[in-house]
Amino acid sequence: MPTREFRPIQLLHPRHWLLWLGIGVAWLLTLNGARSRRILGPGLANLMRITIPRRVHIARVNLNRCFPKLNPLEQRQLLDATLKSTAQGLLETAATWLHPGQLKHTPMRYKGLEHLDIGPKDNGILILGMHLSTLDLAGAALAQKVPFNVMYKRNRNPVFEWLMRRGRGHYFAESIEQTNVRGVIRNLKAGQRVWYGLDQDYGPDNAVFVPFFGYPAATLTAANRIARITQAKVVFMRHYRFEDGSYEVEIFLPDQAFPTNSDEADAALINRHIEASIRKAPEQYWWVHRRFKSTPSGRSSLYEQ
């Protein structure tokens, strides 16, 4: 997959030197595979408390809201586990992008791969995903067994954008920007598989507010509309990390008809399946994202400190 073209002066500008240094450190830290990642993960989690306290605060607020029945000790334990899983996920992503040869040594199980079969007369498959911390590693592993393309949100930093597209280019034929809905439709009508993550808050535009862990959350309506236009098959994807160092990717079907004629009903189904998947391993979700930053009346003050 060709990466987006950048002028060298953009990528080598002095303001990016610290990021390049970080990329070099990440390359070294992930050089020795899964064992070193498991050793480094707890230390990186502790470093996150110092270097990105804002994200730690966001995770704490999200966990307190979504798991209100936990007592204070249980809340702290879940936050600690979440930070360790997030740190592990960052190391997994770095290894996946920077050392693609390591992936063949990763113990990976698959469930429901038959749902990704496409017949000669079938339309494409829209894979509805979620931001569990194993996303890049699990997605790359699955793509080596069953090819698919991915949607993503463009990064404003040209170095990170270049790195992300180059890293994912080892595994995916095409990375489609989130705003390029026509590109997704074109892929699906051509009989391709496309992954689309719908569990982040991009604001109220092109979204409806439906429950997520009992609270209204801005949920994009693009997936069900794309599915209506293309008549593509819709499946869900989730993936987990286990204590023994193995991973699992599961593909499963919606438990009700999708899409329907109701944006609200379709969005509610999506959130219900994502919530059920999170509850299987809540510490492995990307809680550092402000999932509830938008409200029907405007921007939320939930994450203010």
Image: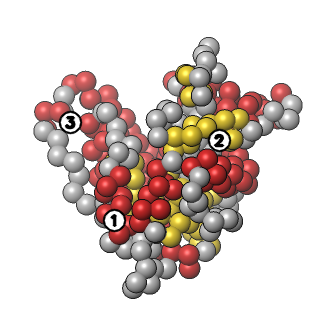
Which badge, 3 or 2, is on the more N-terminal residue?
A: 3
Q: Are marks 3 and 1 in contact (CB under 8 Å)?
A: no
201 left or right of 213 in image: left
* Camera-side residue of 253 and 206: 206
Q: CA distance from mark 3 to mark 2?
A: 41 Å
Q: Amino acid at mark 2?
A: Val
In the image, residue 175 lies at what x, y percent? 33, 55
156 left or right of 222 in image: left
Q: Residue at point 46% right, 35% down? A: 205
Q: Give the quadrant of the N terminus.
A: bottom left
Secondary structure of the residue carrying tag 2 is strand
Q: Residue at point 41% right, 66% down? A: 230
Q: Residue furthest front?
A: 261
Q: Residues within 10 Å of mark 1 (few under 14, many from 20)?
A: many
* Camera-side residue of 216 and 98: 216
Which residue in the protein does label 1 denote? Answer: 187
Please identify the quarter of the rendering in which residue 185 is found: bottom left
Which residue in the protein does label 3 denote? Answer: 11
Q: Residue furthest top?
A: 305
* Vertical position of residue 270 compared to residue 82: above or below: below
Number of the label disc, if any, that sits on residue 210: 2
Q: Residue at point 23% right, 52% down? A: 3
Which badge, 1 or 2, is on the more N-terminal residue?
A: 1
Q: CA distance from mark 3 to mark 1?
A: 30 Å
